[in-house]
Image (tube, grey):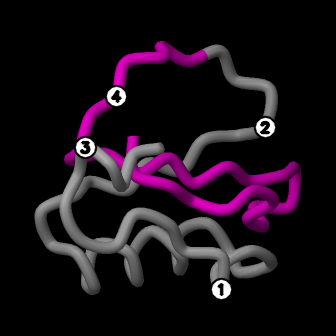
């Protein structure tokens, strides 16, 4: 859904299984106008859409578990 409002690439399925900090760095390198935030699974978040944010969800080992998406 984010791609309808935010131009450019909006998801990074290739980063599932990568370490969160590495994934965040790759996202920010590829799309410098966004801030990638590493977030542990289960963290309560707000639901507003922001074209300059990508949430990188990680498990207890710091590994990405969900496709990072703009929003």
At 34% from the left edge and 28% from the top edge, which residue is drawn?
Answer: 49
Mark 3 and mark 1 lie on one chain; the one further toward the N terminus is 3
User: Given the current orientation, which residue lies at the most extreme left position?
Assistant: 33
Q: Nearer the viewer, residue 63 or 16?
A: 16
Res. 49 mark: 4
Report, in whole angstroms, how far the alpha carbon at label 2 lies from the one at label 3. 26 Å
Q: Is residue 28 left or right of residue 64?
A: left
Q: Residues within 10 Å of mark 1 (few under 14, many from 20)?
A: few
Magenta region, residue range: 45-71
User: To which residue does mark 2 refer?
Assistant: 41
Report, in whole angstroms, how far the alpha carbon at label 3 lies from the one at label 1. 22 Å
Report, in whole angstroms, how far the alpha carbon at label 2 lies from the one at label 1. 19 Å
Mark 2 and mark 1 lie on one chain; the one further toward the N terminus is 1
At 47% from the left edge and 44% from the top edge, which residue is drawn?
Answer: 1
Give the x, y percent position of residue 21. 53, 69
Q: Residue 7 lies in what quarter of the image?
A: bottom left
Q: Is residue 41 above or below residue 58?
A: above
Q: Residues within 10 Å of mark 4 (few under 14, many from 20)?
A: few
User: To which residue does mark 3 refer?
Assistant: 5
């Amino acid at each position: 859904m984010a791609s309808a409002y935010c131009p450019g690439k909006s998801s990074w399925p290739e980063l599932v299984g990568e370490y969160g900090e590495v994934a965040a760095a790759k996202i920010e390198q590829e799309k410098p106008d966004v801030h990638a935030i590493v977030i542990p699974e289960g963290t309560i978040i707000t639901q507003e859409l922001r074209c300059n944010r990508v949430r990188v969800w990680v498990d207890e080992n710091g590994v990405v578990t969900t496709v990072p998406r703009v929003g």
